[in-house]
Amino acid sequence: MTEKKQTILSGIRATGKLHIGNYLGALKQFVDLQNGKGNLSAEASAKADCFFFIADLHALTTPFEAKELSQNTLEVAADYLAAGIDPKKSTFFLQSQVLEHAELGWIFNCLTPLGELNRMTQFKEKSEEQKGQISGGLLTYPTLMAADILIYKPTAVPVGEDQTQHVELARDTARKFNNRFGQTFPEPKTYLRKPLRVMSLTDPTKKMSKSGDEALMLDDPPAEILRKLKKAPTATDATKESPGVKNLFLLLEHFGSEEQITEYSHEQKNNTIKYSELKEALAKAIAEHFAEFRDQKQELLANPKTIMDALEQGATKARKIASQTLAEVKEKVGLL
Ligand code: ADP
Ligand code: TRP
């Protein structure tokens, strides 16, 4: 049976260079989907049209500095490219360079009841964290995200669990729009990535995050990886459950060899494990995994024009589709 062609879309905010949690939780899945290795069916994934972008407009919803924002955008773009997003295979672009997103976002703002935006979990959480700095943009974050998504009429949107409510809002927006103005948007499915949470190396009860301490950055040099891992808390009794140890094993599962996984799991059960050895092996494995990535990222950042050119070309491709959808929407809602 031939399956319907899939269109896949996702984005990451330009709030800082990416760490190993962003990689395992998001970026790696994007690269796999692009290369036909996602766990959509292999056939569907191989033929999928992929759109991956950097949500720089969404980066404005949390406190930011102009200089940092532009640097972060370049860093995230270099992270995407060095990790294997190939602009020849995927449409890779910057949200702010495809103006149609913001325009459709405005239309969706005007069609979305305030109550729906007010009840979004992320809005409530971030408003708590950012007391006194809550902008209109933080509230309307999900309508812009709905526009990011629906403008390409995708079939699947790979996001982490924290973003499923926003994809749900995009589906509601599509449904309501279709009911009122006639069939326009297919309702995209959330492609829920395997729940996976890399925890902080300093406090393994919290998730590793860009704003947290000592996140393991994808471009960290080998000595830095080892230094950060050495600090990670473990346990004195290996047979007892410890969040720090669990986190190290999660990393080992992704970056270690089969033999290492078997050997260290065995030693852990026997309580003979030396965590310093595990950390050294892990640091080496991670450093090796990202060796090529580091070189490529460095090369890209030394020549930001290459990055900007790739983004420009992606934006040109994206605009072709985005402008068609926007024209259709404007006509349907009565904008001349
Ligand atoms: P951060 O929390 O570091 O600021 P973002 O919120 O910008 O990261 O997340 C970008 C993507 O990376 C999202 O898809 C998110 O689900 C994923 N992600 C972020 N942190 C982790 C983590 N520690 N483990 C797994 N996935 C993560
Ligand atoms: N909100 C997403 C995040 O924080 C980033 C994002 C913006 C996004 N627009 C999107 C993800 C559209 C998927 C689809 O991770």
Image (cartoon, rainbow, N blue to C red):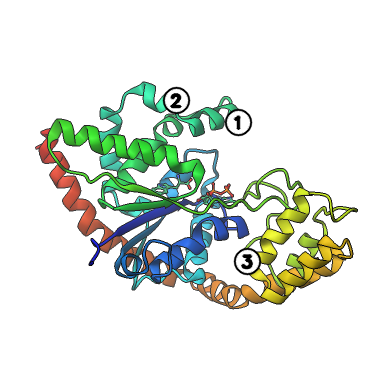
Give how far apart the Cα atoms at labels 3 and 2 are: 36 Å
What is the x, y in percent for residue 116?
37, 26
Mark nearest the camera among 3 and 2 is 3
Image point 30% across, 34% down: which residue? 172
In the rendered structure, the answer to whether residue 10 lies left or right of residue 313 reads right
- The image shows residue 94 at horizontal and vertical percentages of 38, 56
Q: Nearer the viewer, residue 290 or 193?
A: 193
Which corner quadrant holds the C terminus? top left
Q: CA distance from mark 2 to mark 1?
A: 16 Å
Which image quarter is the N terminus in? bottom left
Are dots 3 and 1 in contact, CB under 8 Å? no
Quarter occupied by residue 224: bottom right
Query: Is the CB of the residue bearing disc 2 within 8 angstroms of ligand 2?
Result: no
The reply to whether dot 3 and dot 2 touch (C-beta < 8 Å) is no
- Secondary structure at badge 2 equals loop
Three-letter code for the amino acid on which mark 2 is drawn: Arg
Mark 3 vs 2, N-terminal side: 2
Residue 157 against residue 37 in the figure, above or below: above
Residue at image mark 2: 119
Q: Which residue is mark 1?
A: 129
Which mark lies nearer to you, 3 or 1?
3
What residue does disc 3 label? 254
Q: Is mark 1 within 8 Å of ligand 1?
A: no
Tell me: 78 left or right of 277: left
Of residue 317 and residue 305, the one placed in the foreground of this image is 317
Counting from the top left corner in percent of width and height, residue 214 is at 72, 54
The CA distance from mark 3 to mark 1 is 32 Å
Question: Which image quadrant is residue 47 in?
Answer: bottom left
Q: Is residue 314 above or below residue 195?
A: below
Q: Quadrant of residue 276?
A: bottom right
